[in-house]
Amino acid sequence: MAQGDIAMLKEGAFGSMGATRHAVAAGAVGSIKPGELVLKALGNASVAVWTASNTAKPVVGTDFIAGVSASLSTDTAAAAGVVDIIPLAEGQVFLANPDTAATWDTQAKYDALVGRRVLLSTTAGGVQTILATDGATSGLVIQPLDISKYPGKVAFSIRSGANYLA
C-alpha cells in the first residue's frame, strides 16, 4: 500500500476518536501504512491489508472497513503484528486521489458526481484511488468539495453498511 492515500477532511460530529489497536496477520514488513483504509471481516480478530486483489471495494454488507490506519503496522513475513486505526464515525469526510483525474478536473464535472456511490481501485503498487461509476451496493459516497482548495482530490464518506461496527 502507499502511505497517505486517504486523509481526513472533516472529523465526525463529535470530533475524532482516538486510535484503537488491531491485530495484523503475518505478511510483508509493515504491510499497512498510515493513511490507508483498512478492511476487517466480521468475526475476524485481525484486520486485512487492502491489496490489488481487493480492488473495487467496499461493497455494502460484504466488505467492512475498520477505519483509517494511524500507524505503520508491525507485522513481518514471519510474525503477526499490530496497527493503530482511527475508527469510523458518523459525519467523517475523507480525501483521496481520483482514479482518472480528467473525470474530476472541473468544478462542474466534480459537482455532477456528488452523491454517487462508488468504490476504491487499488493498483498493483497498492495505491488507493476513487472510481466514478455509481453502484447501488458501492460503499463510498462522493461529498461536495471546492476543487480550487483541494485540487486533484475527491471527498468521500463511508456508508454505514460498510462500517465494521455498523
Image (cartoon, rainbow, N blue to C red):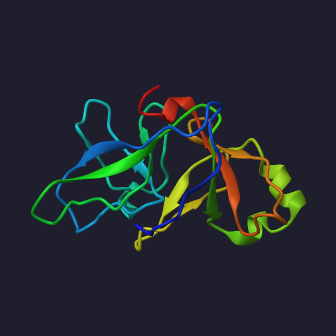
In-front residue for pair 113/136: 113
> Residue 82: image x %, image y %?
25, 51
In terms of image quadrants, where is residue 140? top right
Q: Nearer the viewer, residue 86 or 114?
A: 86
- Hey, which residue is sitting farthest right in the picture? 108
Q: Give percent across and percent down for residue 155.
A: 69, 52
118 above or below 26?
Answer: above
Instruction: Kindly identify the residue that appears in the image at 63 percent across and 42 percent down.
Output: 11
Residue for point 61% across, 60% down: 96
Count of residue discs:
0
Give the residue displayed 85% in from the left and 66% down from the top. 148
Residue that lies at the very extreme toward the top in this rendered image: 166
Residue drawn at point x = 75 percent, y = 41 percent:
115
Instruction: Give the quadrant of the N terminus.
Output: bottom left
Q: Quadrant of residue 129?
A: bottom right
Left/right of residue 84 with respect to residue 141 in the rendered view: left
Q: Position of residue 77 (x, y in %)?
A: 15, 66
Instruction: State the residue lying farthest toward the bottom.
Output: 125
63 displayed left or right of 47: right
Q: Could you tell me residue 54's position as x and y percent? A: 39, 55
